[in-house]
Amino acid sequence: MDISVKVRLSKKPESKVMAHADVVLEGPEGRIQLNSFCVFKPNGKPAWVAPPATKGEKRFFPLIVLSGEIRKRVETAVLAEFEKQSSDAH
């Protein structure tokens, strides 16, 4: 399975969300596009990826849930593209 990622860096320096990412998973069986992952990077801590979510009355609820190896591969691909674009922007 091939994973491609498109990252859009946040233009708001005060935002907790550093970037948004769209992910395409493609293999012999077909293609699926997952939009609106968020990249967070708290002060002094490593960046991490949150899956697409919708806001409820009191908290956010995930729209998709990834687990196992596919979750690791998607998060790694998103963070790699985020780091690449972040370093290119500076």
Image (cartoon, helix red, strand yellow):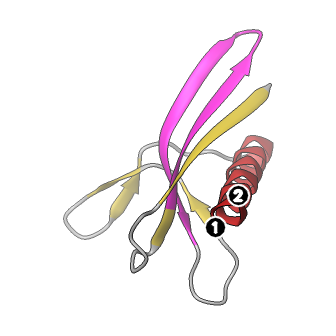
Which residue is painted at 39% across and 80% down in the image?
Answer: 14
Q: How many marks?
A: 2
Mark 1 surroundings: few (<14), some (14-19) or many (≥20) residues within 10 A: some
Q: Main secondary structure of the magenta part?
A: strand
Which residue is painted at 70% across and 58% down in the image?
Answer: 79
> What's the CA distance linking mark 2 and mark 1?
7 Å
Start-end of magenta stretch:
19-40
Q: Position of residue 69 (x, y in %)?
A: 80, 44
Looking at the image, the residue that sits furthest to the bottom is: 44
Residue 39 is inside the magenta segment = yes
Q: Quadrant of the C terminus?
A: bottom right
Kind of residue at disc 2: Leu
Q: Position of residue 24 (x, y in %)?
A: 62, 29
State the mark number for residue 28. Answer: none
- N-terminal of the two: label 2 or label 1? 1
Q: Quadrant of the N terminus?
A: top right
Kind of residue at disc 1: Trp
The residue labelled by disc 2 is: 79
Q: Please, what secondary structure does the residue beneath circle 2 have?
A: helix
Q: Nearer the viewer, mark 2 or mark 1?
A: 2
Q: Position of residue 10 (x, y in %)?
A: 45, 62
Corner quadrant of residue 13: bottom left
Residue 10 versus residue 31 in the image, above or below: below
Q: Please, what secondary structure does the residue beneath circle 1 have?
A: strand
Whether label 2 touches label 1, CB < 8 Å: yes
Mark 2 surroundings: few (<14), some (14-19) or many (≥20) residues within 10 A: many
In terms of depth relative to the viewer, which is nearer, 85 or 30?
85
Position of residue 48 in the picture relative to residue 2 (left or right): left
Residue 69 versus residue 47 in the image, above or below: above
State the mark number for residue 48. Answer: 1
Residue 82 versus residue 2 in the image, above or below: below
